């Protein structure tokens, strides 16, 4: 069985997917979040910092809606429009994770939804 996680504190799904799914085992898998402002549905700024912060805030709210949080994230995947942004994103990411870091992958992709600069997905307990 699975439980669909949904919160108004993160952007609504813009396709046939859920913000996150929680398995009976307690494992939570989030959909990739870009820096969409949940209030207006538009990208939060045109820079990597603004979009990264918003994507992380969206994930924080989704994980909280699932009864979890960043302390329980076991894996994250970061999708970059430009991998040259890695160092700046890493600085912002470390504001949300200070110890017991999750495993992480970072890849550059040719394009992200809505022209976003970054997309992030997480798996948590």
Image (tube, rainbow, N blue to C red):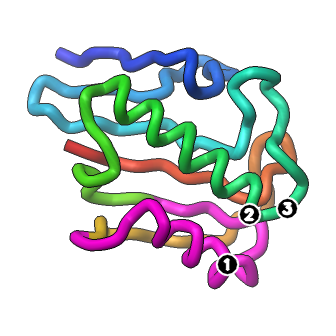
Residue 37: mark: none
**For the residues marked 2 and 3, what is the alpha-carbon distance in whole angstroms?**
6 Å
What is the tally of numbered marks visible in this picture? 3
Residue segment shown in magenta: 77-100
Report if the CB atoms under discs 2 and 1 are less than 8 Å apart.
Answer: yes
Residue under label 3: 47
What SS does tag 2 mark? helix
Name the residue: 55% across, 53% down: 120
Q: CA distance from mark 3 to mark 1?
A: 11 Å
Residue 36: % across, % down: 73, 37
Q: Nearer the viewer, residue 83 or 42?
A: 42
- The image quadrant of residue 83 is bottom right
Contact between labelled residues 3 and 2, with CB atoms less than 8 Å apart: yes
Split into 4 quadrants, where in the image is the N terminus?
top left
Question: Does residue 71 appear left or right of residue 81 in this picture?
Answer: left
Q: To which residue does mark 1 refer?
A: 88
Q: Is residue 45 left or right of residue 53?
A: right
Q: Give the percent coordinates (x, y) of residue 57.
A: 55, 43
Q: Label 3 crowding class (10 Å Cα cut-off): few <14, some 14-19, many 20+?
A: few
Residue 8 position in % (x across, y down): 56, 16
Q: Secondary structure at mark 3?
A: loop
- Residue named by callout 2: 49
Callout 2 crowding tier (Cα within 10 Å): few <14, some 14–19, many ≥20: some
Dot 1 lies on which element?
A: helix
Looking at the image, which residue is at 14% across and 32% down?
A: 26
């Amino acid at each position: 069985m699975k439980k669909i996680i949904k919160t108004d504190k993160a952007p609504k799904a813009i396709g046939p997917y859920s913000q996150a799914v929680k398995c009976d085992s307690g494992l939570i898998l989030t959909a990739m979040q870009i820096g969409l402002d949940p209030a207006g549905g538009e990208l939060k700024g045109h820079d990597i910092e603004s979009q990264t912060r918003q994507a992380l805030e969206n994930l924080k709210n989704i994980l909280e809606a699932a009864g979890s949080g960043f302390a329980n994230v076991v894996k994250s995947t970061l999708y970059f429009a430009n991998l040259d942004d890695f160092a700046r994103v890493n600085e912002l990411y470390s504001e949300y994770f200070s110890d017991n870091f999750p495993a992480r992958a970072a890849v550059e992709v040719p394009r992200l939804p809505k022209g976003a600069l970054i997309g992030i997905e997480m798996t948590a307990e």
